[in-house]
Every structure is written in structure tokens, then in C-alpha cells.
Image (cartoon, rainbow, N blue to C red):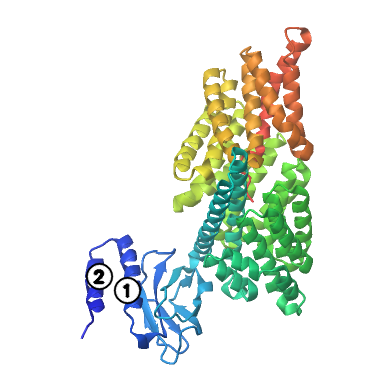
Amino acid sequence: MPSRIDASLLCINVGIACLGDMMKAVFGWLAAILIVAAAPAWSAAQLTGMVSLNRERGEPVANVEIYADGANSVITGNDGRFALSFPEGRPGQDVRVGVRRPGWEVVNDILLDHRLPDSANSRPLEIIICRSDDREQRVAEFYRLKGNQAVEQSYRAKLAELEGRQAATAQERDRLRRERDQALAQVQEWARQLAARKPEEVGGTYRDALRLFLDGQTDAALALLSEERLEQEARKAQEQLDQSVQGWLLKGQLLSTKFDFDGASRAYDQAVKFAPGSYETWFFYAHFHQGLNHFAQARRGYAKALPLVRQAWCDGHIATILNNLGILNSDESRHADARKQFVEALNIRRLLAKQNPDAYLPDVANTLNNLGILSRAENRRAEARKHYEEALDIRHALAKQNPDAYLPDVAGMLNNLGVLNRDENRNAEARRQLEEALELYRTLAKQNPDAYLPDAANTLNNLGILSRAENRRAEARKHYEEALDIRHALAKQNPDAYLPDVAITLNYLGVLSHTENRNTDARKLYEEALDIFRPLAAREPAAYGSNLRRVEDNIRSLSGNNVAGIIGSLIALALLLLIGKLLKRREHPTR
């Protein structure tokens, strides 16, 4: 005779047939929980759960085989649910759950090593699957979400601590927001790294700590990844070395989610100490430091990684390291080195794209874009145009297939071509491209302001330069002021990343005010820009020294109506196009 719970489930199944996909997923979860609640005492050794599509609490997936040693094999129904019975099993026993459906893979495979629950206090196991071709994207999304949640939890806990001590000053809040932004940036790369790993490559302490992290126990994961434990693993036999090093890398990534970048740096130091012959470890070390603008450490890491990866004949990784080195050298105005590295990376990626265009054409477009930026900086405009236009063609084609993923890249190329056309006095074409890019960025920023407001501000700044060149001064001021408002707001949250952009726009506004004989306003703007550029140039002279000198020249041009002042004013105005090249860092170079 069916129980009351059975009847309830029947009602739920009838209701599911009338609901949309989202409600199916919700009711499927409720039903899975009801199964656990209704299980009699003799079914303690039972594992229930649900198979979801692409993400947590996604749509239920039918026709998936779920199996395990010592249990019956089951096929999920339309509600995605399953129940594995273990006649000889007992609560607390460790089991490995298997999932089989041709052409599909598990996203959260690390959770398939499961412990049989106590029927009195259990939670259904959610298995997330996706099509094999989408695995890396979906795995990256899964870990990105988990990492972002951990960062947000750390942020709220630290903010509450400050408020509890009555120490939540504006300065402390800004510092905390800056650390949160840096941690979120580290999460992006960490998620990409995890997605690139095959399930069988994850084991040992690394796997155990990662499981704890996914359960929301970051502190327990860090305790497991103690200095003593990892050092002991690193001294074991050579066949165990890789997993212990992965533990150091994971520790660095987890510490980044808690804004402990000094601790993360030490963890990466340990990783390269115990695996000095691993190009992968040196690459992660370099990428971490490059993301924090630690140029010397990043250069050291890439310099170690490149000869090692060449020995391994891993063409895709060789191209990635060369591309990142090119960006680093371009940022430090080492143009000859940057060009050599970009060209080699492009040649490799073109060959790879012939074999697998879906995987490598986006990389070809990225390096073409970076070469275009470099060529424009060297005043090789014909080459820059050729690179930009080829990259735009590729990104247009990609955006037709997947607009969510590639429309931002299309906007970036339109911005870069607009800047180039402005340099060549093709003003009508430049305006069309910049306005189209701005429209795309405004739309994208409504959905994700943190990601796309900086790009919108960059394009507004470029439109201001164009309007000033066309003597449309009111429009130029409007664009500059909107860009400045956005950049001021961004710099409050993350000054290291956005204060240089604030100074750039202040300088442009100063030039415009000088042109309009508003010299008092111009001086104030220039001096504010100098206050920003002076410490930056002292710390990174290769990156910011030329910016500082140009603003100093502009201030000297405000010397009245004497001959020297007039000549200085003309020089300041002539520098307008040169100053425009300062935005090369913001023209979407891609790692």
C-alpha cells in the first residue's frame, strides 16, 4: 500500500508535468528531500539525489545511469532523481558514485567520492552534468561561483568585525573593498585552472581540501593545507611530488579568496621551491604576480616557465606564455621584445587553429589584438589596422555563434579601431565605431557593471579625444566628465587598478580647459593628475614615467602670455595625440 509520502510524490509528479523547466528543478529538489525524510530505518544505507543540467539546481536530466559498487544501478527519470540502495552498506561508509551517459561529463566530479548518509540527518547528493564539449566552461562557472561565494563570505565577516570594533572608517572600508576586488580577480584564474584539469589529475590533500572548500569550510581546508603537511608531502617520493605542489597552488588560490595575498605569495613561493622544473607551477606563479602588477616577479616566473615548456613541446602553453610576456613587455615599453613574443605566439596559434578552429581561433584574435595595440604604440598604423580588422572579423564570426561570450570582444575591437581611425583623421568612421562600442558597453554594464563600466569609461574618454579634435568642445567635456565620474567611483573600490585612469582623464580635461583659456581649472586638474602619477612613477618608472613628464610639461605651458608660455601651450596641444597613446594599456590586451 502506498504511503502518504508516495501519494504526495504522485501529486508532485502530476504538478511537474504542468510547470516550466525552472519549477521542475525546484520540485525535483523538494521531492528528493522528501524521499530522505520518508526513508524507513532499514534504508539507512541509501544514497538519494538528483542530476542537474550545467549548474547547481539546474534543470533535471533524465536517462542518466547512476551506479556504485555494492549498489543497484538506476536510471534517472524526467525529474532527474535517483536512489541507490546498498544492501550490505552502512551509514558513514565511503563510496564512489559512477555516472554514465554517452557524450556527457560530470561538472562537480570531485563530489562523487561520497559518504553514505545517516538517514536521520542527510542531504541529497546533487550531480551536475553537461555536454562533453562544454565541460571546461561549466566547470569554470561552478568553481567561479564557489570562489566568489567564499570571497563574499570573507568580505562580510571582515566588515562585521570592523563594525563590531567600531573601526569601519571610510578608509578601512575602501581597503576591504580593494582586497575583495583583488580576491575576485584571483578566483577567475583559479576557476580556469581547475576547469583545465582532468578529474584523474586531482587527488591527495589537494582533493580533500577542495572538497572541504566546496562544503563551505575554507578554514578547515587551509588547516588541512598546513605548512607542515605540505612540506612533508613535498619530500616524498617523486611520484607524489605533483600532488603536493598542487596543494601549495591550491593554498595560494584559497588564501587569495580571503584577501591574504602575502600568504598566497608565500604559498606560490613554496610551490616553485619544490617544483622548480615544472613549467605549470612557474606559469601560475607568474600569472598571480602579473595580476597584482608585480612585474619583476612575473617576469621571473615566465622566464623560468618558457624554456621548460619548450622542452615539453606543449605548443598551446608556449603560445600562452609568449602572449603574456608580450603584454608584460608592452606595459614596460620594451616594444622590440613584445613584438617578437607576440609574433611567435601568433604563428603557433594559427597552426593550432588550422587543426582545431573552435578551440584556438579566439586565441588567434587575442594575439592579433595585442599586436595591433603594440603597432599603434609604435606608430605602425597600417600594420595595426591589418591586425585589428582580422581580429574583428574573427570575433564577429564567434559572436554570431555565441554572442554572450564574444560580444564584449567585438566592442573592444570597435573601440581599438575607433582610436586608430581617430589617429589617422578618419573622424567619421572613428565616431561610428566608438559610439557603437559605447552602446554595447552600456548594455553589457547594465547586466554586469563591475566587468564593463571600466570599458565604457575608456570608450567615453576616447570619444572625448575625438570630439576635442573636431572642436566639439561641449561634447568633449561631457564625455570626459562622465568617464571621470565612473573612474573616480572605480578607484574608490580599487585604487591600484583605476587611479592611473583617473589621472589620464584629469590630464585630458586639463588640456581641454587650457584650450578654452580656463587656466585656473586646467592647473587644478593637472596638479591632481600629478599627485596620482608621482608615486606611481616612483614605483614603476617604466610604466608611468612618461605620463608624469607629459603632465609636468602641460603645467609648464600655463605660464601666461609670454613667448615661452605661448610655445608651451602649442606643445601641450600638439601632445594631445601623443597622450592618446597612453590608453594602449586599456585597449583590451588579453592574457
| Circle 1 or circle 2, nearest the eye | 1
Mark 2: few/some/many CA within 10 Å (<14, 14-19, 20+)? some
Residue type beneath disc 2: Ile
Against 452, residue 571 (above or below) is above
- Residue 296 x %, y %: 78, 49
Q: Tell me, for residue 88, which label it has, or none.
A: none
| Residue 410 showing in the rendered view | no
Quadrant in the rendering for residue 483: top right
Q: Disc 1 designates what residue?
A: 34
Residue type beneath disc 1: Leu
Residue at position x 64%, y 66% from top? 222
- Residue 332 x %, y %: 75, 42
| Residue 464 showing in the rendered view | yes
Q: How many marks?
A: 2
Against 485, residue 440 (above or below) is below
Q: Disc 2 designates what residue?
A: 12
Residue at position x 22%, y 76% from top? 7
Residue at position x 60%, y 68% from top? 220
Front residue of this view, candidates 60 and 29: 29
Against 103, residue 523 (above or below) is above
